[in-house]
Image (cartoon, rainbow, N blue to C red):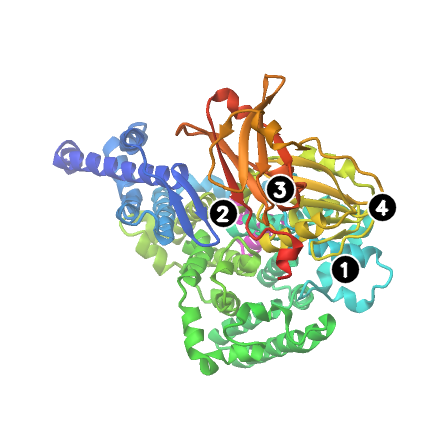
Amino acid sequence: MMKHKTAGGVSAWRELLLAALIGMAGAWSLLFLYFWMLFINQIHYLVENSPIPAEISAVTLALGALILPGAAWFSRDFFPKLRLLNRALFPLLVPVPALLLWPESYFCLLLPVLAGGIAFYRLGAAFPPENYRRWRRLPPRCGVVLAGLGFAAAVWWYFGIQCRAYDRFFLFFSDWGEYSENYLRLAFGENRSWSDFLAVAGHWNPVPNVVMALFFRLHPAAVTVFAVNALLLGSAVPLTYALARSARLPVAAALAFGAAAFLNPVLNGQVLSLFYGYHPINFLVPVLLGFFVCRARKNRMGMAVLFLLSFLVQETAAVFWAGYALYWLAERRWLAGTALFLGCAAFFLVISSVVMPNLFAHASYAQMFHYSALGSTPLEVLCSPFLRPAAFWRTVFEWQNFAFVCSLLLPLALPVLMNPKLAVTALPLLAGVCLQSSPDVKNIVMQYGVEVSVLLLAVAVLNAARLNRGRGSALLGFIGRGIPRNRHASIQLWGLCFGTLALTAGSYFLIGRYAVTKMNWRPDVGSVIEELRREVPRESRVIATSRQRVHFLFRNSTAGLDAKPQTGDTVILALDDGATGAGELERFRAELAANPAAVPLGSIPCGGDQLVVFRLVPPGTPSGGLPFLVPMSAGQFAGSGPLLEQENPDFEVRAGSRGGTVPLLMVRPLRPVDYDVNIEIGPGGGKAGRVRLVPFANGLVPAYAAQVGQVFIAPLPEAAAGPVAVRILRRPESGPLASRKK
């Protein structure tokens, strides 16, 4: 009687009101995070957003208010089911005040994801046990097939993303091209030695060097790098499934953790790791996960082989195993833990302080520039708490360190925090990142979180296996308070699967798409790349800016802007993509402008940038003029069209035409200048619209190298839409060689 009375009385309205509030909170959080959040800069943890229009908020809140009552309506017992949904999902209310008060705080943006994970855990734990019995009976063969399909899907996704990035001028030569260039040298170089296979680009990585050299020997192409990278990162899916099954998790639960491996924002984003796209550290993904699979199966031989193999992937593997020694010490395995820690420390010090400096002819370990505030050798950095305590503690408590750790932990927070003892393995790795001097590297879009994320995956699976063996969790008992069935470990397991999937999916869509989003902003320039390749003979050396150089790496010999141009070279420069420092780019352009052998071949607009191409020809080779840079007297220029107002006193700009129909922009230096310019063209009359940037002479002849009386003529399609506004902008750090030598 009490149930019916409560359902029809004041408590019924209270449940309806609570359901409406929870639904509105969840819907508004989703709107804020995933639809109105413009961008999260994962390098600096900066949040770009804008106010949500009132009408969109109103519609969202109205729909949100109906979600839970609508879901309960399809059940026979409306109010009991509504009460259950309210109990399960009330954590969605918690992050709303923080989002309203601090909408631009990176930490506050993580709260709704965490609250969603907890809410979905509670929802999963609220279902009756019979709902899960069918999942427990899922055949192992079916699980293997689904895990294999997941692996194939991950590889296909990772490979496709890299191909798209390649066709959008996203990949930098540093370090993607540096690794590829070294692998080509190892595969085909004539003067290589055995020591060349030990280290590349300042890292100790014999296994990646040998494997990649063999693959390049078979097929020297960019797609080889893409395929290997996709296989390495995609291996996390089947190996996580294998680890879960080896730890005796049910097939459905193992598949859930395999999906969590694919959705992990660190591993998924690593396929386009900032500046890299590929890094040898990715070889540790299958090696470390394979180690934990062998550990779960008590295969000591496999553990030993993979343990030793990891030391040949990268020197930082020793840091990982030093952390594993800390776990052994926490388990009171004093002798084994101490021996492993000292052995790993000795290995790292020998490799970094003796072997690597000799291989690279450096005075110290090549990576020590990251720790310049704490010391110049690994030993000095280890002693920095005593030698430089102020710098040490200032670096430790940089807020970016906490943002980095929270970003790593968030996708797997529930299963890891159930029993975080094994997670202490990550402490030395985290110290290696968090003690770096620059806060800009303490993020998940570079390669520094790979080993930690693999470890957290293993910890999550092994903790779930503890739960499956009937060993309950105090953490899950706490966050599941109010859910009657939450006290059963088997129910907690399925709730944990729900919560983990919610956390990883939410984390991926919020913080795991930084590189992919930036890549998608860039236009597809595959046709431009093919046009450039047609202009470059195979025997020509290509000197190019970073993003363009990678496209000739497997076809021509290449060099950067520090090279001295020689006869027969082809030069390809991107003038405004930001990949090359302005000083370096303008110095090289000044050298080209002063070199009579540098003949311009053409200029190509490319997605808001301008590519310019030159060829170094033998002395005396005739070259034609540029049709858009013509001599014109002052009188001719004055009669070419109306004067356009602009603020630069060194230039005069007029709006002319060809044949009276084709509008043209005409720019004439009034006097010799010692800088180059871009011409900004946009709508006039205070109107808003697209702004276009055109380099003087399309970037082929700097303004300071133009002859007296020469006029730059460019199409002006904007004139057809009305008045035009023009600004003459000085290019930073531009100028002739003579001005640079002063």
- Cα distance in 3D space between marks 3 and 2: 16 Å
Name the mark on residue 469. Answer: none
Closer to the N terminus: mark 3 or mark 2?
3
Mark 3 sits on what residue?
A: 165
Label 4 amino acid? Glu
Estimate the spatial distance between the alpha carbons at disc 1 and disc 4, rounded to whole Å: 28 Å
From the image, tell me which residue sits under label 4. Answer: 539
Q: Which residues are magenta?
A: 235-264
Residue 538 appears at what percent x and percent y?
83, 43
Magenta region includes residue 241: yes
Relative to 203, is 335 above or below? Answer: below
Using the rendered view, name the quadrant where residue 140 is placed: top right
Which badge, 3 or 4, comes first in the chain's sequence?
3
Q: Amino acid at mark 3?
A: Ala
Q: State the residue position of label 1.
A: 210
Residue 525 seen by the camera: no
Q: Spatial distance from mark 3 to mark 4, Cα to Cα?
A: 27 Å
Real-space Cα distance between discs 1 and 3? 26 Å
SS category of the residue bearing label 1: helix
